[in-house]
């Protein structure tokens, strides 16, 4: 049998974690499993990725970026 029992789950290089409290609120960014910084805007995510040598062509591609606790437009905590 050449098939595996579980489906393929991609592990993107960039993970943007849920919104953290702060003034202003922020999201922690991980690259390759290592915390590399905090992002307060979508542009901050792109800057952190560029600093790590990663060019992001599509922020909605789950193979590139995983958004945890919201999507790319979520920058405030939900109540």
Image: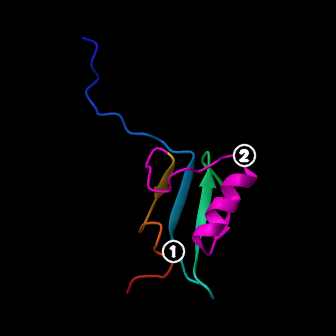
Q: Is residue 13 above or below residue 44?
A: above
Q: Is residue 75 visible?
A: yes
Q: Looking at the rendering, which quadrant does residue 22 occupy?
A: bottom right
Instruction: Tell me the residue at 47%/54% (across/down).
Output: 66
Q: State yes or no: residue 70 in magenta.
A: no
**Disc 2 element:** loop
Q: CA distance from mark 2 to mark 1?
A: 24 Å
Q: Is residue 13 above or below residue 19?
A: above
Residue 75 on image: x %, y % = 51, 77
Q: Look at the image and give the residue range highlighted in magenta.
A: 36-63
Q: Residues within 10 Å of mark 1 (few under 14, many from 20)?
A: many
> Which comes before the other along the chain, label 2 or label 1?
1
Q: Is residue 36 visible?
A: no
Residue 13 on image: x %, y % = 57, 45
- Which residue is at the front of the view, 43 or 77? 43
Q: Looking at the rendering, which quadrant does residue 27 occupy?
A: bottom right
Residue 47 on image: x %, y % = 70, 61
Considering the image in quadrants, where does the C terminus appear?
Answer: bottom left
**Residue under circle 2?**
53
Q: Residues within 10 Å of mark 2 (few under 14, many from 20)?
A: few
**Residue under circle 1?**
19
Residue 34 on image: x %, y % = 65, 51
In this view, the mark in front (2 or 1): 2
Instruction: Tell me the residue at 62%/63% (across/down).
Output: 45
Instruction: Tell me the residue at 61%/55% (across/down).
Output: 30
**Disc 1 element:** strand
How many labels were placed on the picture? 2
Query: Is label 2 in contact with label 1 (beta carbons under 8 Å)?
Result: no
């Amino acid at each position: 049998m050449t098939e595996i029992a579980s489906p393929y789950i991609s592990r993107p290089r960039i993970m943007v974690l849920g919104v953290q409290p702060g003034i202003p609120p922020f999201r922690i960014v991980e690259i390759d499993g290592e915390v590399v910084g905090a992002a307060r805007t979508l542009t901050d995510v792109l800057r952190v990725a560029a600093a790590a040598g990663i060019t992001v062509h599509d922020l909605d591609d789950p193979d590139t970026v995983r958004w945890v606790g919201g999507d790319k437009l979520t920058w405030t905590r939900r109540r």
